[in-house]
Structures are given as structure tokens and as C-alpha cells.
Image: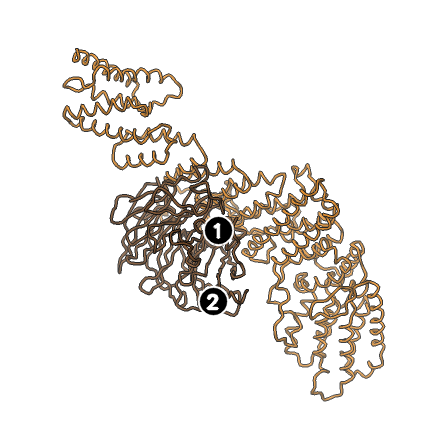
Chain colours: A brown, B orange
Amino acid sequence: MADSGDRRRFIYNLHEQSKPVGAVRWLPSVSPFLRLAAMSVLSPPAIEIHSFSSQSPNPNPDLNLVSSYPLPSSATSLTSFKSHNYTLIAASTSTGSLHIFSVNPYDGKIESQIISISDKDSFHCGPIQSIDVETSSTGECATAGEDGRVNLVLIGEDKVENFRVCESDGLVAYTAVKWGSPVEFVTGGVGPGLQWWDKRRPGGPVAQFKGVWGHGTVTGMIHSLDIHPSRKHTCVVGGSSGAVYAWDLRWQQQAITLAGTGLEAKSQPFSESEVWEVKYDAFTPQVSSTKVLPVMMCSEDGFLAVLQQDERPVQLLEEPCAINSFDIDPQNPSDVIVALEWESVGILSRGREETEMA
Amino acid sequence: MPGIPSDSSSLIPFALEGSSQPPPVYPLQHGLRAPIHRIHISWSRGNLLNVTCLRPPPDQQEEMAREDDGIGGKAIEVLLGGAILEGNIGEHKRRRIAYESVKSYAFLHDKKISLAKMETGDNLSAPALTYWWQYTLEYSKSIRDILGNARLHRPLIEDPKNFLKPEEVEQPIGTKAAWELMEIFYVDMQLLSWLPERLVDWLEGYDSLLSKTETVHSKLAILQRKVTSMRVVEDEPGYWNGLAAALAVGWLDVVAKLLRLHGSYDPDQFDKRETENGLVEAVVLLVSEMPRMRPNLPNGKLGLCYQTKHDYIKGLEKWRVKVSGLESSPFWVHCNHRPTRDGLINLLHILLGDAKHIADATSHWLELFISHLLYIRPLTNGLEGMGNLAEKCMNLKPSANNGLTSLLAGILSENPEIVLADCLKAFGPWIVAHAVDLLTANSEYTDGLLNEERYQLGGASIGELYMLVYAQALASHPLTWQVAPAYLSTCLNQGRGLLEILLLRQPVQNYRVVLKTLEICHLYELGNISTHIMKMAGMYQWKHGHKGLGIYWFQQSRDKTRLSQIAHKLFDNIGKSLSDDSFKQWEGLMELLGSDVGIAGGLEFLHKYREFKRSLQQIVNGGTVEAAKKSTELLVQLMRNPSTPQRFWLPLLLDSVKLLEWRSGPLLGVSETNLLLGKLQELSMAKLRPDFHGGELKPNALGDVRLALAKNLGRAILEES
């Protein structure tokens, strides 16, 4: 069903952790020799910063714990970004709090806490399922919660402002949010599909997409969204039943299925379980400019794969347990970090040392 | 379970009758002032115990007197240690082993099923069986790797004074030792002919586990620590004792290394010690040429290998002649150093198999057993002979038995039930669940014994019972429960039921966890369980105000009853208030419910209804005739529309009273009034039906409406005529 990829060109290292890992993110690194990654862990809930040397003679470099930031409850979403030469990490929790702190980009030590919001009335009451930070201009953090609220948090010089964008009183449970441009973002949730919001037009979403999932026969939830900076009108979505599809704002009524039984029955499913995360993959070359850019996905049944429109999926990993999260290093798109259900983290390097391995 | 606690603030578990060990006591820090009035104990998830301690309820006066006494009770969580494996390894290592081993286990079972399918009969035929032990051996090896494989880790530059393996590399775990022991005896059929030598190797790896103080290993460890500070090693009795002990259990490389530390090798000598040195070297040579009945030796190990019994016996005879030749050699007279002479001769006696010397050199009965196998009865074969020998050794050197030694004794007594029971006691449920396949690999008798369905076990076999025990241990931890279904699914009798219970017990708060549970339901084709779980998740979310998620789960589980209840509730609430906020709520809910509302055009109705209600509000507040007419028009539209639910007829009719009693002439014509009367009639009939949904209306409401309608009809007839 799927090409198993050319494994010879991959280097894959598994790092056992002694606690469950939720989400993993690469951190911007200053030195090419020392790489940093953030991961959310449970028992006790915290965000941990790990470092490892990418140039070490040891073929299996260890992940070293550098610092740890405690959280009041388990992390539900994690993101890292750069702002004014600071490396910042934002995390949301299952009790509705948002935490942003800065990390030293040279050694990964936690420097200072920027924000810690937790307010049942004016912020979220219940798990914040997803957060995303707009990094190109405003630095606003959008938060989407299971309680049906969408908030925008503006991180100012000396104060933090919080605007409620949507209050659905629990009618919609939002599970994913992603910025498209400095003023527009997309949310996904349970119930009425995807919503496109524009800050300039408050009051409600400017566009909606109601995908009926698998003809109503299978569970359908949106777990992850991604928008490519060069194609701001297209949003790629990962959800239940192995569904990965792209929604183009210009052709709102129909989505392009990349994988899964999803919207159209014609495509064969690659994986039939939950697609926990999707991200555009800058490493895989694009086949045609008219098609959806290559997308990487990870799933509950242990697959990590690259999907392309009208092409066979390229399988990168097939693990015996779920892959809960992954991240592609923006600086080195060949490197992927994955979080596995069985308390471990894997680092996959694609394409390097081709001559050596061949 | 409320109860009156004893005066100490401790929890004492119930002790079994006849248990030799005193029950362990775990003190709990609850921080409450005495006295404690009541204690409630309940199980939480997994091994978590919830203990609630309550102080006596304060009297009125007392309360006034001691305002600052603080809290009246406290709830504490107590995590009891789970034993998936034995105690000397960390919790996360245990989970790692559980994660890794499920792959090997599932692989072996898939093989078993596919082989069974190939064979038509119930029992595997002879050719399948010959393959079978190889599969099992592969399985056993992969499990052994999971348990840790860094047994021999040698530094690049060896210090001549370091004769012992660096211990800190990895403390061997007892579970692995037990596993290897079972592999030696039950799985590897090729190597049965050199069983004694395999046991020698096994002891070398795990001698330190036999006892903390009384082993060859502990003796050598003490010597290793001292040897760096010793100036003249051969003067120390510890040196010769260590040598004899190492030789007795066959660690020839250690012996050779230790002998080369002998002072006679030192180049700066005052006295002439050539003869002495020659004798030491002669012993080293004999030790390194010792014949061994095995196919090969790992790197760095000493001895000469013989593949067949015949060659071995010939080699052994020749070598023994050499050893006894050296023993009776005239050179001993020239050896002036007495300890060296006595020590070396002792070593030669051990090599010749002198029972007394061997017994003196070893510490544990198992070591004595191994030395007997090496020097006195190297051709011992068969479990019976070994069993007799082991018994003899136990009598000669009574030492405290631990899990490993009783396991070996159990194996030698050829009783698989005892082996498994001992394993469970010493190493926990993990090893037993995985070892059943080892025990049954080569023995049809054991296979029958362990896989026979037993009435007194509820139809389960002994093997299944152990599997269930392990699955329970896995299921009790929130991180390993996902591994348990793989084992439960192999339990044919009771696994299915327990799997269903396990899945139904998973928390439904987090939708991601629910999806993971549903995935497992899907994998094992448990459709009805997944429906149950979705209903539970829906109830949880609905109760917590997450209406969207709640309805989503109800729709997924096709819970028509609850969905129609929600729809009824929705309609009950409509009309009670007309604020924009609540209207938005209804609108949203109706959108979510979609076709589940039970009426076509639900949303359309809602909008019209609101419009009508608004215009009616204006009239009540004093509106014009036009407004009243428009309102009437809306009412008639609603009444004519087939999508208006019947339950709204009565509220609409009640509302119509306001319009019917309009002061300046009738607003409704004859035909419209007749329409309303018709609806009223239909409603009166429907009221008699059991499924009628009337809402909360006054008993005489229908009468009021009928009166108003009749009045209006009269006025309308007059008007129109």
C-alpha cells in the first residue's frame, strides 16, 4: 500500500525516557553542534529542554536533560518560536492555563517566565487543546479550548492583553488552531469542521467548511492543522480515521483528500487510525506547483509518513506503538523528532551520510 | 469501607495465616491532629489507594473554643509498588521491559496461530515441532536482549591487577538469570550435550545474585579491592583462598590472571625464585589447557574444547596424567615459599577433583554443584542425575535458598508447576507469563499440563491463569494498560471478558484517551464496547457543559434515546426566554443535532417562532393594529407549517389568546379560527395518548383557549357576514 522509503539513507535513533512524552518541538539552535529540543512530559507535568550533539563521533548521541519548567497540569499543546532574538516556548495545559517562557539559545537553560495565565472566567475553563503564535509581526498567541472559547493573547512590552474572539458556550469544542497571516487564523474542532477567522471582521468566522467525515460512519475529529507561509489560502488538516486533507479558501466547498477514508471514498486509506499531527514537509521536493505541498503525518498506529497529492505515501517509520507528536526542524528540514507512546523519543535524520551508508 | 482505626497512625495490611514474614507496615503522613475518627479507603486507578482520614465532628462549644484547630479531615493518595518484575530494578525499567517484550510475544503467537492453521489436527505434527523449538529459541533470545545484554564489557586497556569484571557496568538482574536458566534447560535442544558447561557459564554471569556475602564472587570482590594495596600477594591467605574459589567454579581466566600477580614474576628479586616461578607458570599452563566438553569458548576464556565425548575422555585422561605428574614432582622441595607451595598443591587437588578440597573452596551449594560437574562428574547428563547431585550438594553446604536456587531445584525436580510458582514468587508475573512458552517448547507433557483447561480454574488453563495475572498487573498502571490487550487476546477462556472490563474502565475525560481506547476496540472488533465507551464519553462531556462534544459522541454511538431527550429538553427551553444569547444557544444546538432533532426544517421553525414571539412582545407592550395583524399572520403560518412540532401547538394557541382578545375587532377570520380549532381538537385527542409531551401547563389551559377561540369565531362570523 505504501512505499517503505529508502531506509538506507536514514539514521534513526531511539532515546528512552523514563516518563511519558506528550509533544516534541525543535528549538532554534545557535550552534550547529549543539541541538536543542523541548518536550512535554508527565509525572510530574513539565516542559523539559534536552540537548544533544549532532556532530559527536558516537553514532547514538544521548539526549541530555538541560532544564525543566514545571506545569500545574499536563501539557496539551507546545510550540517554540523566536522573538527579538529570544527563544520562547509556549505551552498550554489541561486545566486551561497558558505559559510562555524564554530559553537561552546557547545552552537551553530556562531564563525567565514571560506569561502564566490561568483564569476560568476571562480565559479558559477546561483544557486548551491547541495554541499557535503569530511570529511574523504581532506576536499574538491564539488559544483554542475544549470549552468552546478562542482567545487571542497579546504579549506586550510590559503587559499581557487577552481578547475573547469566540465564546460558543460549549457548543463547539475546539481542538486545533493555526495562524494563516498576521490577521487571519483557522480553527478546527468537533462538530462543524473548520472555521476561518479574520481579526478585522469580528463577530464570527468568515468562512466555514463542514466536512462530513466518512459519510458519518466513522469518528471524525480534527487533531492538527498547518498552513504554509507561501500558500496562505490552503490549510492542511489531520484527523480521525486516517484522514488528511487540504482545504483551499478559494474553493471552499470541496477539500482535497491526501489520505484516509475521509471525505471522498475513492482514495484507499493508508492508516485508519487517528492522525495526531500534520506538518508541511520542506525536505521532500515538490512534484508540481499546482498540487498541495508535501505533508508529513504521524498516527496512532505508529506510522510516520510523507503524503503527496495523487502519489503513494512514503512511509518513514513504522513503530509498534503510537507516534503522538513530531516536529520537523525548520533549520534542518531533514531532521525529524518524534514522540512515541512507549516513553521514548526518536530522532530521524534523512538524506545525510548518503555516501557513507550506501 | 469505614472503620475505626487503631491508635497508631499506620496502615497494616491483612496478613495471611501461616506467613513466616511479619506484615510490612507503611506509615502514612496525614498531618492531622489526633484523634482520627474515621478512615475511608478506596481503590483509585491502578495501584493508587485513596485514604481519607476524618477527625471527629466538633461539638458546638468545642468549635468556639478551638477555632484555630485547622482542618477536619484529609484525603491522601498512596501509591503501592506494583511488581511486574522483581524488586531490584526501577519502575521505568520494568515498563520498558513490558513494552519491548510484547513485540516478541505477539510475534511468537502469530507464528503459533499460522502453524496451527497449516496443520489440520489440533496438535502440531513432528516437523512443525522441530521448527517450533527454533522459533521459541529466537523468542527467548530476543527477550534476553530486552533484559539487558551488556554483560561483558571490557575496558580497552586492561589493568593487570583488575582480574574481576567491572561490576558497575550493569548489575545483573535476577529475572534475566532465571530466564537464561530456563532457556538452558527447556529450549535449546542442540546444546543439551554440554549442559554442565552451560551451567558453568551461567554461574559466571550470575554468581553475585546467589547471596550477598557467601559466594565466590563476593570473596573475589573483596580480594580485588585489597589487591591494589597488597605488597606481597602470595603471603596473604586471601589470595590463595580466592584462587581456589575461582578455580573451583571454573573461572580459569581469573585464575590465570591472579597467578600472574604472584611475586615470583617480579623482575627485581633478591632471592632466587626461578623454581617457584616455574611451578606457578606450570600450574597456569595446566589450567589453561584444561579439557572442556563444549563446541567453543568465548574470547579470553581458557581451556581446550572437545566436541565429542570420546575425544574429551581421551584428552581428559592425558591432562590428568600431567596434573598428577606435576603434583608428585620433585621440584616442590625446592620451593621455599610455603604458602605458595601449599596454595598451588591445593589448586592441583581441585583440578584432580578432590571432593574435600572442592568443598572447602566453594561457599554456596550451587557453586559446589557446579564444581562437581566440572571436576568430578563432567559427563553428568539428564535431569535425574543432576537432581541427585544437587541434593547431595545442598546437604553438604546448607545455604539460604533464594529465588534462583529454588528455581534450579524446581527445574531439576522436573516439576513445571513448581518452577512457575517459584518464578512468580521470586520474580513477579512478567517472567511467568512469558516463560510458559519456554517450558512447553519441547515437552508435550508440559504442554498438556499447562494448557489443559481446568474446571476449577473456570475453564482456564494454568498458562492462561498466569497470563491473566500479568495482564492484570499491566492493566493496573495508566502507562502500561495499552499493552495488556495483546496478552488478554491470547487467553481464550477469560481474556475477552477481562479485556472488555479493562476497556470500559478507561477514563473518558480526555477525548484523546477515548480515541486511543476506541482504537483498541476497533483492533479486537469490540463494536459494542466502543459504543458503550462513546456513550460514557458523551454523558461526561454533556454533564460538563461541553454540549458539542457530548452530542458528537452520542451521534457516533447512535444513541437515539439520549439525542431525542436532548431535543425534547431543547424544545422545552425554547419559549421560556427570548434573549439573544439563549437563542444563539438553541440555534447552535439545533445545528449540532441536525437530523436528530426529529423534525424537518428545525432551524426554519426556530426562526419563525422567534419572529412571532418578538412581534407578540411588541403587541403586549402596546402595539399598532398593523403589528397585531402581522403577528397573526405569523401565527397562522406557523400553525399551517407541517414542520412545526406538535408540542408547540399548545404554547402557540395559548399565545394566540392575546391576539384573540384584541380589543378593536377580531384579527383572525373564520377559516383561520377554524384552523386553530382544528389543531385544538387534534391536541385534545393527542393528550389521551401515552407518549404525549405536554410540558408544564395549567390544567384548564385548553378550556381557556377553547373559550377564546369560540368568542373569536362568533365575532368573526358577525364581521364577515
> Which residue is under mark 1?
A313
Q: Position of residue A313 (x, y in %)?
A: 48, 51
Name the chain letter of the residue that bears numbered label 2: A
Real-space Cα separation, disc 2 to disc 1, in angstroms: 29 Å
Q: Nearer the viewer, residue B640 or B458?
A: B640
Identify whether B614 is placed above or below B410. Answer: above
Q: What residue is drawn where x is 35% and y is 46%? A: A125
Please, what secondary structure does the residue beneath circle 2 have?
loop
Q: Residues within 10 Å of mark 2 (few under 14, many from 20)?
A: some
Judged left or right of residue B139, residue A2 is left
Q: Position of residue A20 (x, y in %)?
A: 48, 54
Q: Position of residue B380 (x, y in %)?
A: 80, 59
Closer to the camera: disc 2 or disc 1? 1
Among the two numbered marks 2 and 1 on one chain, the one whose residue lies closer to the N terminus: 2
- In the picture, the quarter occupied by the C terminus of chain A is bottom right
Q: What residue is drawn where x is 61% and y is 45%? A: B469
Identify whether B218 is placed above or below B610. Answer: below
Q: Are marks 2 and 1 in contact (CB under 8 Å)?
A: no
> Which residue is under mark 2?
A54
When asked about the image quadrant of residue B14, the answer is top right
Q: Nearer the viewer, residue B471 or A276?
A: A276
Q: Kindly identify the amino acid type of the residue bearing the numbered disc 2.
A: Ser
Name the chain letter of the residue that bears numbered label 1: A
Q: Nearer the viewer, residue B511 or B599?
A: B599
Q: Kindly identify the amino acid type of the residue bearing the numbered disc 1.
A: Pro
Q: Nearer the viewer, residue B334 or A323?
A: A323
Q: Position of residue A234 (x, y in %)?
A: 35, 50
Please, what secondary structure does the residue beneath circle 1 have?
loop
When asked about the image quadrant of residue A67, the answer is bottom left
Judged left or right of residue A199, residue B379 is right
Judged left or right of residue A189, residue B424 is right
